[in-house]
Amino acid sequence: DYDVGSKMMMTTMMVPSAERISEDSGNMHSPMQHSFHCDASQPAQDPITGHNIDYASCKMESNMQAPMMCRRRPGWVTAGLNNVDCAVSIKDKSRALRCRSLHGHNRNSMARPLLFLMTCCSIFSVTFGWSPSSSSLQQQLLPMKPPSLPFLNSRPTTRLEVSSAQLWASNQPSQSPASLSTEKATSPEPPITGELNQQIDLLIQCLQDEKSNGNGIISTQPMDILKGMMSIYTNWISIDRPSPHVKFKGSATIDKAFRLVTNEAFSTPYQLSWVNLGVETLQLQLHSSRFCDDSNANGNPSINGKNSIRLRTLQGPYNAIPKGTWLKALRALTSTDINSSQSSPYTSRSIKTLSPKDEVQWIAPPTAAFRILQRLVDDRGIRTWASRNKKQSKQQSLDERDFNMVLHAYASYPQNDFIHAAHRVMALQERTAHAPPLSPVAYSILLKAYGRWKDIKNVEMSILHAQRNGVVPDIIMANTVLDAYVNCGMLDKAQEAFRSMTNNGKSESTGEVEGFWPLLQPNARTYNTLLKGMAEEGDIRGAMKFSKVVQKKQLWDEITTNTLVKAAVTANEFYMAETILSNHTASERSQRRPDHPNIEAYTELLDGYAKDGQLENALRIMQLMQKRGVTPNEYTYTCMVRALASNNKVRQARKMLNYAASLPPKNERRMELTPTYNAFISGLLSDSKNYNVDISGQSSHAAKIVEVLSVLQEMQDLTIRPNVVTVALVVDGLGKCSPPRCKEATELVKHLENNSRARQNSYFQGVRENAKGISLSNAKIATALIRAYGRANDLGSAMHSFKRIPAPDVVAFNALLDACCQCEELKLAFDMFKTHASLEQWNKQETTVNAPWNLGDEKELISIKPDVVTYTTLISALLQLKSRAATKRANSLYSEMKKKWWISPDTILVDTILTAMISGGPIGFEEDDVKFTMTVLRDGKSLEWENGQYEKRKRAVRGIIVGCSSEVWKNDEFASGLVREQTEDPLFTKKGWNKIDSGFQLWGRGDDAMQQTDGENSSVDSFLASKGWNDIDSGFRLL
């Protein structure tokens, strides 16, 4: 029952005399007889001298001499126990030889070799836990604690026993990787291994079934299996209390199940439901102690369960996640598959996670990726097999691509709501000592985002920040800077930067070396970016001149052709565009894409002709494309069908639709014609301003609705699935009927919802699966219904449609406010505005990052950030009341829009306010009205107006403020300059005369107090005109 090797050691080393050995040998087997009982016919060698030994002749002799040998050699035996390493050294072997020679034993004696072998075996058994027993528990390589012997229980513990116990304790190794691997190999299998393996087989089958479904919807069964395995592990730990060696093996088995799920969840192609499953799996393994074992109650562990036991954490290092798994999750969360539709509120916060208070939170995928990046930086929750010695520990290596992936995910959002988070990514990389330094790649990602958002201030700040950090720009970063300047409408800055980077970093204006832009070699993208800027400004002459430089450097490509054609079409230079295509149409198609490289240029020219009303030339371009081997694509057909439908060419448009639908698939890809049919419906309903008045040569609006419904049925017959835009267009058309056909629109949406079975990827069953498909809860379709109900003065149904939307956006909110205003429920509109457009609630929502929808029955209150359309709707409704209080409230709203939300007005809002303010004339125009009007006019100066439109508004306002009773405008610099501004007299301009100040003006005081009335060339004083008087400067004014 106990270790025989230890028994040998204790019997040999602790006896005081040969008599004690004789007594013990009479009661039990002699240790030497037990250990060295061999076949007498088989000779052996002495382990020290190497001579052969005859066991048959010396067996009894060895038994008789062993006690005496032990008694005569206590010194080296005791030294061997105190220092095991010395006992097995060469020095101890020499000492044994000297002892043997002193006692004069002959070579044929068995006592000396047997004694030496016995001593070596005893020391070996103490040091390494060796035992001749065949038990698997006694064959471990790790040291074992000496057992308590029965015959030693009746006496006090000797010093030798204490030394043996201390020796065992001092040789226990720490939890190092080598010892853990040895324990794993030598420890027994946990009793729950069979049950865990069954669960793993069930998990593998479950994952295969989920993948084979193909609908993107995942059940909770994989998580239930994992939580069940953790529950089994928790119960086993609580009841059996196994050793760390055995727990290690059980944890390794469960870790295998976790890796099966994460490897499948974070594999390409990425799906939101699978990524959510992988993230929840990581949270369960990393924070298993935050989950509770409720398996006895409902079968599944949960979070914060009542009257339940928390799950146990796996044995280290399996309580952490391998770095490779974290990197897989990082790539999945930053991929374009997961972050492709951030403009929709459904995907802006779509990753389930746990808050520090164990509350469920929904965060954006880049935010989840940023948390993983922080773990990689801080080395938290990262599984490592490195030594735990602090002197040998070192930081995990970080890759620049990991930071750039998270930064790109944030910067790819269409709105700049997450730009502060992008700054956090760059700050984390900059302040982490063991992270790679910021490179031109990171700045290129940030500059591209700022250029897309047209934020010129932050573009220049990013360039300055890169310069301060000593970043040396490459050609990719230079092209990004040029594109950002072009998108911001700063072509002059883009050209200045181009000259600096191609002129040894010298500024053309100062001639000094700027020290940031090195001498770079521009490529085709560099020149094409500048050509794009010229095209957007309509500078066709400058673009053609610059294109000669491109051609001279042999950098002309298909993008250059497409860009120049766009510049010519923007400037209405259609002949020049055709000339460019005639000279630079590519003869061969690119192998990378199925379409012709110049299909964009031909489509741009065709669309330009169509929008200009030149349908014959547009059709001619279609024929020219076929002659030159340029096959039209779906975008070409879409532009042509929209032009025909907008010009009431219904029959020709239907004929082109049928032709496009009959085309065979190209490169095994069928042409996507749903946008083409949408263009037909949009063009057909676009010119219906007077919906029910029949016009010669055109169909009434009701007849067009019949045509639209016929097209919708045709799409279904051709298996062309209508999308949300299709249904929204049809619903909006039905809402424009008189009276609005709202009930029919609702029934149509329900019918298409049942037929299409549009189901979106959703991981949790509480979220509506068809929230983004064709349904009454879709934001676009519900917005069209709200507008229709507003025209029908059915505010209750409009409110009901708004409440159906899981996460209403600002467009739906604006439609609801407009419906309230149309129904003369202005108070309700302001109550809705106060409830949903609260800045405090918006900031709180952005900080806590709550879910855009609730998994329960009641929907959470969502704060909506208003836009300029929101304020235009409310201010217009207030000014229509034409009361002093309403005007004061409109002025307050306008100030709130600019100062609180930082929203700039547009031309529509400026026109709305100016028209309402000056429509009553100067009578009753008080001080607050003058200040409000001048503020709006001053804000409109920075907007883009058509030629002469802003000057007309200035003349109208000038005539009002001069004729009003208040003279507050004299204290305003802008207003005073407006009044003093002299304009050319229309008569002098017509005759080509110059103006001489003779002290007497034939036409009165001129244009200082003039207002255009009847025609373009008539200017009279507003007050005198109302009285029928002329204006003579007599030196004083009546008013």
Image (cartoon, rainbow, N blue to C red):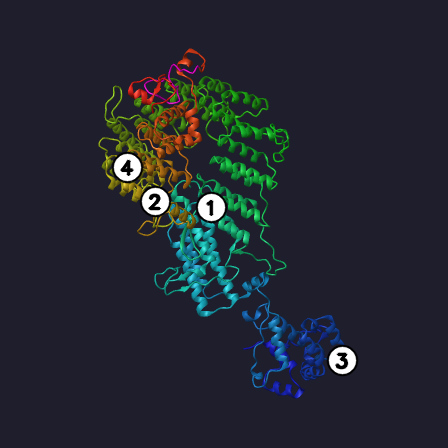
User: First in sequence: mark 3 or mark 2?
Assistant: 3
Q: Amino acid at mark 1?
A: Pro
The residue pinned by badge 1 equals 366
Choose between 541 and 511: the one closer to the eye: 511
Crowding near pointer 3: few (<14 within 10 Å), some, many (20+)?
few
Considering the numbered disc 4 on the image, is that residue within a helix, a strand or a loop?
A: helix
Q: Is residue 466 above or below residue 201?
A: above
Q: Amino acid at mark 2?
A: His
**Comparing labels 3 and 2, the label whose residue is closer to the camera:** 2
Q: Quadrant of residue 809?
A: top left
Are the residues flagged by discs 3 and 4 in contact, CB closer than 8 Å? no
Considering the numbered disc 2 on the image, is that residue within a helix, a strand or a loop?
A: helix
| Region rendered in magenta | 998-1016
Q: Amino acid at mark 4?
A: Cys
Q: Amino acid at mark 3?
A: Asn
Crowding near pointer 2: few (<14 within 10 Å), some, many (20+)?
some
Q: Residue 983 vs residue 74: left or right? A: left
Q: Quadrant of residue 702?
A: top left
Crowding near pointer 4: few (<14 within 10 Å), some, many (20+)?
many
Mark identifier at residue 821: 4
Is residue 1011 found inside the magenta-colored segment of the image? yes
The residue pinned by badge 2 equals 836
